[in-house]
Image: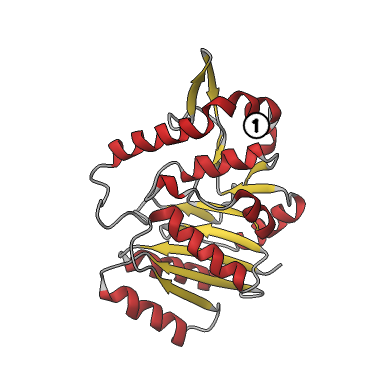
Amino acid sequence: MKTAIIVPFYNRWDLTHQCLWDLYQHVPPQDLEIVLINDASTDIDCESGVVWWQKEVMRHPIRYKKNKENLGFGGSMNVGAKIAIHYGAELLVFLSNDVRVSGDFVSQIQSKVDANPNSLLGGEIIDWKGGWNEFTVDDKEIVIHYANGWLLSCTTKVWKTLVGFDPIYSPYDYEDIDLSTSALANGYAIIGLNSEFVRHAHQGSTIASTDKGQNRLEHTKKNRKKYEDKWLNRLSEIVEINNDVPRRSR
């Protein structure tokens, strides 16, 4: 199964370089390519760093695109997915650049997706009350299970059905919950990788260059309202249809 790992970044080339080095060390190159999306970075070492990896390191083919303007997390992932699909990717792996890799997690993803092709896979599944995913519908508390956005994966077929990350949440927050909800609404399973070979280091990932996280809480509140406007009247139905999600999510 031809696999593409999509990695967006904004500045902080040190994180992307470390991510690429981890992949170089631990992930076999068979039928795998990496798609780097430079989200309108301003640091010059981002360009030179990509050139070095493309010319000097031949383990994994690297495709590269620099956005003309900052699109944020979801927008950059969508760009990367379009490129990967154009070049024949059958399995898409969306990876934040602040993830650390210590083993061949890609083979683990391929095995899980082979066994569950109609699914959205996450590095971890949030199936507990996390604040972000708690909603009240008709005086009933609902907890939406979702695949955490630092590592997501699905087949190209599933991705096309989900139509990618919704741009209404740009530049960040709620894209992963929204994508997971869309997966549940389409009858797809939400499954967790839960691998010892990959972990989120929480060192910072793609954010808007004009924001830099300074208004994060306010932006998150606005995106929560957008999510509710889009999904709230369907959440009870989605949870009822997928009432076995806790068993499938582990």
| The N terminus lies in quadrant | bottom right
Total labels drawn: 1
Q: Nearer the viewer, residue 84 or 161?
A: 161
The residue positioned farthest toward the right in the image shown: 115
Q: Quadrant of residue 47?
A: bottom left
Q: Is residue 250 left or right of residue 20?
A: right
Q: Is residue 173 left or right of residue 185?
A: left
Residue drawn at x 68%, y 31% is 242
Using the rendered image of the protein, determine whether residue 101 is visible from the camera's viewpoint.
no
x and y percentages locating residue 44 in the rendered image: 26, 75
Q: Nearer the viewer, residue 109 or 168?
A: 168
* Residue in the foreground of this view, choosing between 137 and 125: 137
- Asked if 68 appears above or below 171 in the picture, the reply is below
Q: Quadrant of residue 188?
A: top right
Q: Residue at x 51, y 70 (%)?
A: 35
Mark 1 nearby-residue class (10 Å; few <14, some 14–19, many ≥20)? some
Q: Position of residue 16 (x, y in %)?
A: 39, 66
Residue nearest the viewer, comparing 113 with 231: 231
Residue displayed at 57% across by 41% down: 180
Q: Quadrant of the C terminus?
A: top right
Say if residue 16 shows up in the picture: yes
Q: Which residue is mark 1?
A: 246
* Residue that lies at the very extreme toward the bottom in this rendered image: 55
- Rendering quarter of residue 32: bottom right
On screen, residue 42 versus residue 67, left or right, reads left
Horizontal and vertical percent position of residue 137:
52, 19
Q: Amino acid at mark 1?
A: Pro
The vertical placement of 157 against 43, above or below, is above
Color style of the picture? secondary structure
List x then y, in percent, for residue 125. Answer: 56, 40
